[in-house]
Amino acid sequence: MLPALGFIICAIFLAMIWALFKNKKRISSSPIGRFFFGFLLIILSIGAVNYFLVGINANRLYFWQQTIYGVSLGSVYALIALGYTMVYGIIRLINFAHGEIYMIGAYAGFFAVASLGLPFFLALMFAMLTSALAGVLVERIAYKPLRKAPRLAVLITAIGMSLLLQNVGQKVFGSIPRSFPRQFTGLYRIGELNIDQSRAIIFVITFLLMLILQYFVVYTKPGKAMRAVSQERDAAQLVGVNVDRTIALTFFVGSLLAGAAGILVAIVFPQIRPTMGLMPGLKAFVAAVIGGIGIIPGAVLGGLIIGVSENLVTAYVSSSWRDAIAFGLLILILLLKPSGILGRNVKEKV
Amino acid sequence: MKKGFLLGFLLVVILVVSSIMASSSEPIKLGLVGPMTGPLAPYGEGVRDGALLAVDRINSQGGINGRQVEIIVLDNQANPQETITLVNRLIQRDGIVGLVGPVISSTSMVAGPVVQRQGIPMISPTATAVDVTLQGDFVFRVCYLDDYQGLAAVNYAVDELGAKKAGILFKVGDAYSEGLRVVFRDNFRAAGGEVVELAYNLGDTDFSAQLTRMKDQGVEVVYSPFYYEDAVLALTQAQSIGLDAIFIGGDGWDAQELLDQAGLAAVNAVFTTHYSTSDSRPVVQNFLSNFQDKFGRSPIVLAALGYDAAALMMDAIERAGSDDPGEIRDAIAGTEGFEGITGQSISLDENGNPVKDITIIKVVEVDGTPQFEFVTQVGY
Amino acid sequence: MKTMEKHPNRINHSPIFIFLGLIALVFINIQVLFDRLDFYVVGVLSVVAINIILVVSLNLINGITGQLSIGHAGFMAIGAYTTALFSIHLGTPIYINLIFSGLAAGFVGFLIGLPTLRLRGDYLAIATLGFGEIIRVILQNLRLTGGAAGLGGIEWFDNFFLTQFVAIAVVIITWRIGGSAPGRAMVAIREDETAAETVGINTTKFKVMAFALGSCGAGIAGSLFAHRMTYISPDGFTFMKSIEVLVMLVLGGLGSITGAIFSSTLLTLLPEFLRVIDEWRMIIYPALLVIVMIFRSQGLFGTMELDFGQVKNLLEKLIPRKPLEESNNPNPRLEETVSFGGVKIEGKGPILETKNLSISFGGLKAVKAFDIQISRGALHGLIGPNGAGKTTIFNMLTGVHSPNAGEIFFNGERIDRKSPNSVARSGIARTFQNIRLFKDLTVLDNVKVAFHLQADYGLGTAIAHPPSFGKAESRITREAKELLKVFNLIDHSMTIAKNLPYGAQRRLEIVRALAVSPKLLLLDEPAAGMNTLETQKLMELIRWVREEFNLTILLIEHDMSLVMKLCQTISVLDYGIKIFEGTPEQVRNEPRVIEAYLGEEVS
């Protein structure tokens, strides 16, 4: 399976680089293009760090191994961050309950595999759909009645929903962690680097989902409606966009991805619990802000940056400083470029 | 709307103010405080179930000196501030004569001064931080200290496994984990060994960075002072990256789930714990079967400690022959040779800490499935 | 005070409510004093008091100043750890620890606030979240703070009376800040940051001040907390703790101090009653929260105290005071009684001069090499088609945008690198094309805010309330009312600004600008949306204002008849370039101007 996947990735990369040279301006102005700029930049800077700091007295293999782990962790953040970024983009809400949607995805996947005995990819679909329905339900129950309310009220509602889902989860699923049946235990070797099959799958699926999402948002009609609503809700309504349905659709799609993240994370770190959503949820939001909130490739870029830097900090400093680094990075970005790496600064109109 | 708020507010005030309860009824009241909701709920529930079993047993035997025992369980969500409120409530409202718990060290740290001031004896089943019992002469515990557990682990690593280089994987911000880490590190170094310490955070599920680094450094044993959920992840991830050092865990590893979830990845790991289910003493076997009967599942190890804490408390009440908290305290302090599940003969030292044996258990493979095997008991 | 209008969205103030609260307080105190309550109840009451301190201090940041902070637990942690270290190593008593903990937390709040408060809204929220977490992680890693194991052995001190006293003190201080010039500045920042700057409020200063004060309150709460717990560890100060405080605040109603007190009491006591259904408590609690938010999203008390004028009225009702100064001048006539800060036309040279002023937005050159000289006392018009860059020039003159090139001299002093508030201080005030009043404040408060520069007392005075404070405040109120009278707005002084009729809103904006006591007044399309009659009146008003206040006026206007009749000199702008300048007569006959307005009527 891997050679095929590797081939696909290489092809995508080559296509992007080719496109880059063919039409410089267009690429640098499209978010996807900038994403790839950013991605190449990360790889290059990681390489540079490796060369200058690490290469001198330590094991480079270890360094790259950690980077790979970081990328797979970052992919999970990225998937969750996509939902955050879409929801924020459309209704300017930090949807704190999103982490719990991810948790629901993990449990749905667990029951699909462990109880229903579904094959993995069907379980993935099942988890995604369950999460998506849960996400839409949360929107319908808690956020829709508050469409005209002060934003802080909606934020508090989101926090309330997050706590509620977490505690209902503890009642329904039990507070004892469940063990996800092992999947994809294979190991690939590239040179001396180990890549677990499960981690490779996380990365590839994240990547494909991001491309599909970008296509959906940019080229399809509902996607265009989403962008229209996120830019100017009233105007979108005037030109005939069903705003409520579009917002529900955004929650559906965002939660779909969180569900995927839930089951994907469970195949690498096979333990799920009702409180698993809190930290990844926060980190994913940080990722979305770092990449530029409201921008789809930005969420993925932010997720990868956080994943990789967290793993490198864990590997070379100490994981006790890890959370400080993630949030420190966040503050740095906010102070230097509040709109995020891929975002555009907007001047307030006076 | 406004009237509603006003009424509500008044109601609250009146309720708070007017409810001054007194009057002790017939049963002897004990209190138990621990996390029953939240991420630490499994431990709180384990302790609770063990304690309930102990109380049931006494009551079915006619109670203490003819009086039934009632144990009031409250959920503190492992929150220290909540714990103070609850302990005060149990003492002032419910009129408990003794407190079983709290379960977590940090909550026991704040509960200690509260019971001390009000002169109610407290036996923590599971708080292993050294300082807990130093807060006053009303504070006791039935679990051994982190120090002894860590020391036993070092002795096993050095004497039995001949390890020269050890890794420690510990959980940042967790008093239990960090306490054991320090004991192991200092004693292992004192024994001439080399130590690599790596940390992880609450909620982490990915230890591959730390484990790869340990493999890189060529450690022979990995001391892993954390609970079994994380142990499962560490063991499976160690297997997948090909780290073949022997894992040494603490009492947090003692759970059937470790075997169920980690599978053969757990084989060869050892851990220190409180008792062995293969112990043939009737008190242990009765506990196991009664627990199974009452709750329909096998107990987690903390349930045994909950049982012992409650049993010791009731034993002391019986010995004191009174429900006066001061006399109960004296009786607890004078405990000698109490037979519990976690020790054939438990005595309490001058600080209120138990003197008993530590059990070491190893995971072995039997017919393709992992199983716990009793290795040894070490005194100290 | 004869015109007390009720805002429809507002719960009517009921003194009886506060009265009942006070009775409850006294009742509880008597009970505690005579040992009628047990440790448990008194302990819960102490928790209530600590929570009130936390919520009320957060209210200063989130509610009054409108800066969304969700990292309050971090500052509480700093206070708690300061107390712990002092108590353990120095053995200092709680009174000293309280002060130092407050100072320490306030200082860290100041350090963090300085760079962070440049951010707005959700971004600020996330940054404060980040800082809160970073503080916790640092505490977890420092040897000094005992790492994850925390610090034990803090002297036990859990005296309900002290905790209650501190809580009441914090409430009173917050209340007093709210009713003072610094408090009005903070509210103005919440309402409209740009407008606040243009009336001379140093928004950065007051944001940082509010943040530091709020953090200080959290530190004090942390100190009481540490003395009560005797043992603290970093996991007591997680993100969830910050959220808990925020929830209490929002449930009570953001910006409402009484709401904050009510909801922190309710949310601390409620779980105690819900213990009967212990198992379901953690499901019911968030569910209730969601339900309350859905059905009453402004919080239980709404924005009941957003308007400090009403609170003051309420207090005046409760505690009878000397009636307001109105009796001093039963029938004041402007000319005799008041001198507004306007200065006599003095000095030499033009009052305003720009050289080569240019700015571009993302490659688009909005204004190119703009030169203008405005003589003292002039009524100067600035006209041009839509998008010609007129408002952009106003923005540069007032410091809202900084020019890419060129210089601005005001009274011979270079001002083009100054912040909007210091430009306002040096004497330039403005109105906005799209009216930017402090919408949710009363008309009177809108003007009082703008008297900010004349409130010559500091935060200490605001808190301590010495006689000078009362004098300064009544002077501000008097002058504000005088101004409102002159502009025929006095009957609306207690109306919420956004409920004013359109023309009155325009007038109020001019009043607000005049309250800054400017030497130069910039009016951005004052006649927009007015009918002929209103325009006529406005024209007279502008003329009169210039005479009466000794002003120089620069005016942007599309209503040509108004500009032609009113102004002595007119500059014409097209595509960011000044194409002509001259008298109305010259402008009317200039072909370039007619060409620029192609299709537009030049009468």
Image (cartoon, coloured by chain):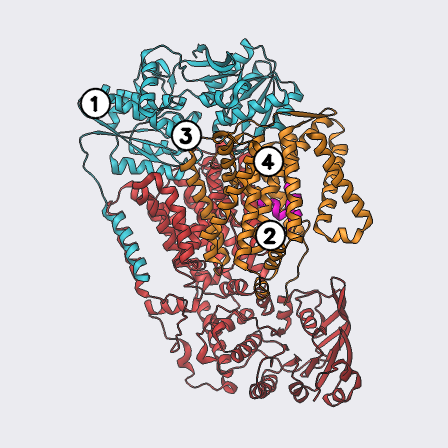
Chain colours: A orange, B cyan, C red
Which mark is in front, 2 or 1?
A: 1
**Residue linked to disc 1:** B63
Magenta segment includes A287 = yes
The image shows residue A234 at horizontal and vertical percentages of 56, 64
Chain of the residue where label 1 is placed in the rendered structure? B
**Residue linked to disc 2:** C116
Q: Do the residues bearing badges 1 and 3 touch, measured as CB atoms within 8 Å?
A: no
- Residue A44 in sight: no
Q: Do the residues bearing badges 1 and 4 touch, measured as CB atoms within 8 Å?
A: no
Determine the secondary structure under disc 2: helix
Chain of the residue where label 2 is placed in the rendered structure? C
Label 1 vs label 3: CA separation?
A: 28 Å
Q: Do the residues bearing badges 3 and 4 touch, measured as CB atoms within 8 Å?
A: no
**Is residue C508 shown above or below C160?**
below
User: What are the residue bounds of the magenta stretch?
Assistant: A284-303
Amino acid type, residue under disc 1 in the picture: Gly
Q: Do the residues bearing badges 2 and 3 touch, measured as CB atoms within 8 Å?
A: no
Determine which of the numbered discs, if any, sits on residue A321 in the image: 4
Amino acid type, residue under disc 2 in the picture: Thr
